[in-house]
Amino acid sequence: MRKIWILLVTFSSLWAQGENLRLSVPYQQYKLDNGLNVILHQDSSTPTVSVNVWYHVGSGREKPGRTGFAHLFEHIMFEGSQHVPEGMFDRWLEAAGGDNNGSTTSDRTNYWENIPKNALELALFLESDRMGYLLEAMNPDVVEGQRNVVKNERRQSYENRPYGMAFITLFENLYPANHPYHWPTIGSMQDLDAASYEDVVNFFQSYYGPNNASLAIAGDIDIDTTRLLVEKWFGAISAGPPVPPQAPPAAFLIESKEIVLEDKVQLPRIYLAWHSPSYYHPGDAECDVLSSVLSDGKNSRLYKRLVYDLQIAQDVYAYQYSRDLGSSFIIQSTARPGIKLDSLLSVIDLELAKIQSHPPTNREVQRSVNQIQANFLRRIENIGGFGGKADQLNNYYFFTGNPDYFQEDLSRYTALDPVDIQAIARQVLTPNRVVLSIVPEEKRELAK
């Protein structure tokens, strides 16, 4: 424990306040007249900068029958805008020594560039042009081309991948049909085919304005100069329509759902899924630690029993899948050859009953918290990319309203003790769950 906290003082953005060591990332935050939220963080440890844009739209903003738009735009946004010809976004960044990427979830879409400090204005120009002037370069042919790319990605990542339909099936059964988390981020083939060009344009106009976005810039920057550059490139972009808050229907299970899927796989696999507390809400951190106690490392409870002691499973994983409107706690395990899934399920349920009856040990909880702390600190050593400081500033702003939520985030874990983990196990791991068995084709007898 002591070694981890000593690491804090090695980072340029972390300091001690008084006698208490506190993790903090200093920032400046303001809004442009068009509503764009801007977060600036100075870190001169390396001559690099990360530009990170979060659009507060993900697949959860889509409608039944018209899904997959947010992920489709993740592709379209790299295809050129009014002042950036097709193919030049990546080429200009690479020529300047930078790299970039993007990702889409049910809650948000993000794009980022990691560049040398002297290429900051290039990254701001590129991001501003696709925010303000994408539609001038978009046409039905561009949409159709990227629609086909996304459909092929769905085939590769889901339909033609072993166990690939597992999570689509889990969330379809965890959430009602009109809930934003019922459909996958990638959308359905039918919805992608049915979407008209006008549908796609309307989605962009509704959600990709500066008033529904947050721009975080972290790295070796001069704050005053950067403010002028942000105003120069983003200030003239018109705001989009107001985006109302979401009001999803309630999501809960009143009984256990048991589903069997046949797939082109060699070994059967079981998935268990429950509703759990939302991201950063009370109980979310407890679920992270619970998942670690259950399956993180060879001495974890489920791994030791299923894989090491009984040798009836190839693997086992437990994790908290945290999201804004409600999370999911998931356990999955792949059986060894010749083992039926009900054998795995009985052992899993026995171990879950144990942790509900008796708290984990102090050692188990402390080991999990130490691992979470170490991973957290390693991640924010970097200013850019997924999980780096620029991304975390946007993450915390979106989910909590406070960009510098770093200490509060870590404190969610360091304040836990074993009875907290027992309590969340009792609260979340109820008999009302989704039990999904994926078995080899024509071998349903291996299912639970």
Image: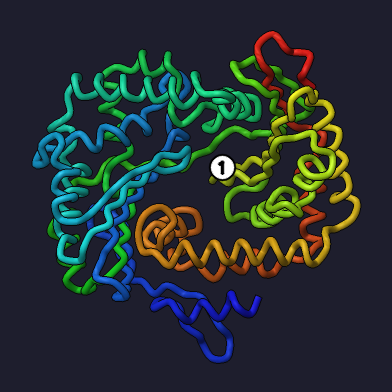
Q: Is residue 147 above or below residue 275?
A: above
Whether residue 352 is visible, yes or no, is: no
Instruction: Farthest residue to the right: give it.
Output: 357
Instruction: Farthest residue to the bottom: give it.
Output: 18
Pick the residue in front: 132 or 15: 15
Q: Is residue 362 above or below residue 244?
A: below
Q: Position of residue 158 (x, y in %)?
A: 50, 24
User: In percent of the image, x 32 and y 73: which residue is there?
Assistant: 43
Q: Position of residue 261 (x, y in %)?
A: 66, 17
User: In percent of the image, x 77 and y 61: which residue is there?
Assistant: 364
The quadrant in which residue 337 appears is top right
User: In percent of the image, x 70 and y 31: which residue is there?
Assistant: 334
The quadrant in which residue 326 appears is top right
Label 1 crowd bin: few (<14), some (14–19), many (20+), radius 10 Å: some
For the residue labelled by badge 1, is the local secondary structure a helix, a strand or a loop?
loop
User: In percent of the image, x 38 and y 42: which residue is there?
Assistant: 103
Q: Is residue 313 above or below residue 218?
A: above
Quadrant housing the C terminus: top right
- Read off the residue under disc 1: 325
Amino acid type for the residue under numbered disc 1: Leu
Whether residue 201 is visible, yes or no, is: yes
Pick the residue in front: 28 or 169: 169
Q: Position of residue 264 (x, y in %)?
A: 59, 16
Does 241 sit left or right of 132 as displayed? right
